[in-house]
Structure formats: C-alpha cells, structure tokens
Image (spheres, helix red, strand yellow):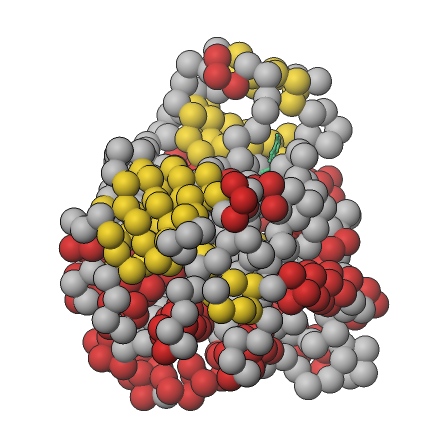
Amino acid sequence: MPAQVDVVVVGAGFAGLYALHRLRGAGLSVRVFEAGDGVGGVWYWNRYPGARCDVESVDYSYSFSEELQQEWDWTEKYATQPEILAYINHVADRFDLRRDITFGTRVTEMVLDEAAMRWTVRTDGGETVTAQYVITAVGPLSNANIPAIAGLDEFTGPIYHTSSWPHEVVDFTGKRVGVIGTGSSGIQTIPRVAEQADVLHVFQRSANYSVPAGNVPLDEATRREHKANYAERRRLSFRSGGGSPHQAHPKSALDVSEQERRDAYETRWELGGVLFSKTFPDQMTDLASNDTAREFWEEKVRAVIEDPEIAELLIPKDHAIGTKRICTDSNYYQTFNRDNVNLVNLRATPIDSIDATGVNTTAERYELDALVLATGFDAMTGSLDKVNIVGRGGQTLKQAWAAGPQTYLGLGSVGFPNYFNLTGPGSVSVLANMVLHSELHVDWVADCIEYVARQGALGIEATEPAVADWVRQLTDRADATLMPTANSWYVGANVPGRPRVFMPFVGGFGVYGEIIAEVAAAGYKGFELV
Ligand code: N01
C-alpha cells in the first residue's frame, strides 16, 4: 500500500468507513488504520451478551446511499450487536472498502511537518505513512476504563470487560459470576448473565435510570413503510435534537394537564429507549419538569421490583433523569426478583479488594468463578490520548487539551492544521445518532478539503478566537441545562484526574448541523488557510 497519501483515517467504525468512501469518491488517496481485525469499531469490540443499540435500526444506519437503504432489511426495531456488525461488514464489501484498510494495526503517532504541511503517521506495525490530512475516527467510547481495585490482577478466573468481549461464546452455566458496573453495558448484560449463572452478584456503585428497550421484530409491512418514507425520516432526523425523527411534545411538561403529561410519557415509554428523556422540550433544562419524568419513571420501575428495599437501592437519588445517558434494558429490574441474583450496594460497603477467588467488600466476601467488568470508558478523549498527536512547535494534543478539549466546532484545533477529529468533544457526539453524525462530519470535512484545494492552499487551521468562542459557547449552553449537574462521563467524572468539563455540544443535532453549514458557506469562517 502507498506510503504517501492524501488522507490517513484512524479507525474503521461508522465514521472511518464513510470517510474512506466519501474521500475516495472525491478522488483522494486514503489509507485507513484499524486496531481491530475487522470493521465496525465499537460494534466490533462490544460483543457482550445483550448488546443492542438504543437508537432504532432504521435510523441508526447510513443515509448516503439510497440503494443501500432500500436493499438492507433490519429484522428488529433495535438491532443487536451481531446484526449491526453484519450490516457494517456488508457496507465494507458493497463499497469495496477493505482494500484501503490495514487491520490489526494501531496508529501510535502522528507528527506534523510544518514546512511541508504534511503529517507523518506511524503504526505499531512499524509502518510510516505521510499524508496531507489526518482524520481521527476513533470513537468517543472506545478506551476501556479498568477500575483501579487492589488485587484485580490476582483473580484467577476469567475477567471480561464488556468492551473487549471474546469472539467465542462465553458460557456462565453453573458459575458464580460477579458484574461490576450498572451503566448501559451492565444493565444490558446482567439479565442475560443471570439466565445462565448459578449465582450472580451485581456490584452497584451508582444506580441508573433505565427504560425498557421496547424492542420488537420488524415485519415486512413496517419495513416497506420505513423504506417508502426514508427521505422524510432522514430530513426530520437531520433537523432533530438527537438524530432520529421523533419530535418532543410542543409544550412544557408543566403547561399540560396531568393526564396529557402521563399520556406523553406513556407514549415515549412504549416507544422504548433513550428518547424518554426528550419527551418534553424543557425536561433537561427545568428541574421541576424533569421531576415529572422522574416520578413517572419511578412508579413504573417500583411496580416491577418485588422487594421494596431492593427497589430503593435501584432508584437513583443523586442525579436528575437524563443527565447521565438513560440506559435501555430488557427485563433489567425484573432480574432482581430472581433467587440467583444478589445486589451489592457499594455505596454502603465499597469493594476493598479482589483476590484469587473473589471480591471483598468492607462487609462481606463473595466467592466468584468469573468476573465481568462493565465499568465503561475513559470517554471522549481517552482514545485520542493513546495516539501521540504532535502539532506545531512540538506541542501534543494532550498538552493542548490538558484543561479540557479546545476545539472549534469539535472539528479543528489551534496548532493542528489539517487535522480533523470526528464525532468527538466539541460536537454533538454521543448525544446524537452516531451514524448520521458521522455522515454530517465526513461530508463537512470532505467539502472543506475540496475548498482548500480550490484555494490553492496547503491546508487549513482553526483560529484562536474561534476556538475560545466555541469552548465558551459549549460551556454556556451546557450550563443552561441540567446536564452538567451529574457526575457523568460527559464531564469526565468517571476517570480520576480528568478536568471537569462538559464535552459534547448540547444545542441539538439539527442546530449543530446548521452552525457548521453556515461556517462552511461563509468561507470556513473561524478557520484560516495555511
Ligand atoms: O459505562 P458507564 P457503560 N467500582 O460509564 C461503574 C454507551 N453504550 O459501558 O457510576 C465500582 O455508563 C460505574 O459506577 P459509577 C452509552 O452512551 C450504549 O455502561 O462511576 N463500580 C457505572 O455503574 C453509555 O452511556 C449502549 O458510580 C465502578 C459503570 O461502572 C456509554 O456507552 C450500550 C467502578 C460504568 O458505566 C457507557 O456505558 C452500552 C469501580 N471502581 C454502552 N468503576 C446502547 O446503545 C466504574 N464503575 C444501549
């Protein structure tokens, strides 16, 4: 493969694959490096039992090809990990993408050559490639958070992190299993592990809000209807708050009757999944409004948990509903009615240590044959930190972002010309449907690269005032909502030492799309040619 290309893309998930397709279509030479042995990014790695997307499959799929939209048949409303992986493999084959991807290879370093205005990219396979542009499509949730628990490495049974699950089937039949972590991954996998394990101990530090996934098989008539209305569905999605076509109730939660409010929540509850937090437009900005959603949620959840003391532990008391990403589940709360499932409240009795055969809390010892870590990610910046990205004057991105991500539109940074980061901090990122967000970003970057070529310039770089203004806007917009009040991974609160900064753009996917389109239309205002 060529050692000099126009563009290097890091990562072959949804964003990286579309970047390859789009940029190749624009006549550019592209190399993609991917750490996994296959395409799919997060869907390649997160193979834990129960892994499923919380955005409807009809929406969580590429819109760039009408033929692709029409020919692919989703079998369920919310697709499982294997089905999404099959889809993304189909896309890689259909658009002949694999020939430009080097698998099983991590990019370790990207260094700017300021004189040539090119990047030198090095990999752990010993390869060196130079490129005019570099694009990181490494995913905001891709660097596992391994908890610093004393003795973890002494455990002699198997330890599985949800985000690097083995490719072969893991059978917990007859085993004593511990799951640490009750976020989205834990909440999806716990019911499945409970069905197999002899005994399951769930180690919960923080309770989370979860809404039933509401998954159903898709019949042919529904698929036909989706396909006939795809254009409208996509139009609404690109203008929406989160990248799917559903619109919030037109009024405040506090300006409707009790019955109307209940009906609205009930409708969203039936729809299933994460959109429950967007039932009313002011639910994430007004605590009183948020409380109405929380109360409805509590009533639903208490009704399915038999033991009121367990229910009390499973109901969050420390954050407003939706300020951490709402989890989606299939029978999560009902799982705690099973005789073989035990909830361990780590708030009352924290884990003290792990040894060869079990977990010790400050109160009790739990003998285990296997341990599942559903402990999440060093989110948003963790995977970027693993690449030594060296810009102007030898400054690394890690140094430049020491106080929190410093981006313009989430796409560009001062001192890092011709470098674009996709769907990361400073963009809507994890608050939107990541497939459509990837398309939005890639199309913008492709147009930008074309613009630079038309101007006869070597490159483009964000300016300092534009970055300062964007960072301020991000904070102001977040502070006008309830979002920063939770100790979430959105603010880096789950990883010790991370600065507390709300990293995504909360203004909505549609608004963000308008902002970046206006910037492009105004000759990439806030960027300068170099
Ligand atoms: O990770 P998390 P996740 N001792 O960070 C606990 C997306 N996603 O992988 O909250 C004990 O949410 C931690 O406790 P606490 C989605 O965006 C989507 O579950 O820090 N416990 C928490 O309970 C999601 O938000 C889907 O007190 C420890 C858990 O581990 C994001 O990925 C599915 C601990 C981590 O929860 C991340 O979800 C899966 C320790 N030392 C993921 N350290 C869908 O599409 C951490 N914890 C449905």
| Front residue of 116 and 375 | 116
Side of 57 where 300 appears, left or right: right
Q: Position of residue 433 (x, y in %)?
A: 48, 66
Q: Position of residue 1 (x, y in %)?
A: 16, 49
| Front residue of 321 and 341 | 321
Q: Position of residue 233 (x, y in %)?
A: 43, 83
> Is residue 255 placed above or below 290 in the rendered structure?
below
| Front residue of 508 and 191 | 508
Which residue does the image show at 32% across and 58% down from the upper left?
7
Q: Does residue 465 appear in this view?
A: yes
Which residue does the image show at 57% across and 76% down from the upper left?
525
Side of 259 where 510 appears, left or right: left
Split into quadrants, the picture shows ligand 1 in the one at: top right
Side of 524 where 135 appears, left or right: left
Q: Does residue 294 appear in this view?
A: no
The image quadrant that residue 227 belongs to is bottom left
Side of 377 where 489 appears, left or right: right
Which residue does the image show at 62% across and 51% down from the upper left?
405
> Is residue 265 placed above or below 317 in the rendered structure?
below
The furthest residue to the front: 115
Q: How many marks?
A: 0
The image quadrant that residue 336 belongs to is top right
The image quadrant that residue 247 belongs to is bottom right
Q: Position of residue 24 (x, y in %)?
A: 24, 67
Which residue does the image show at 69% across and 61% down from the upper left?
468
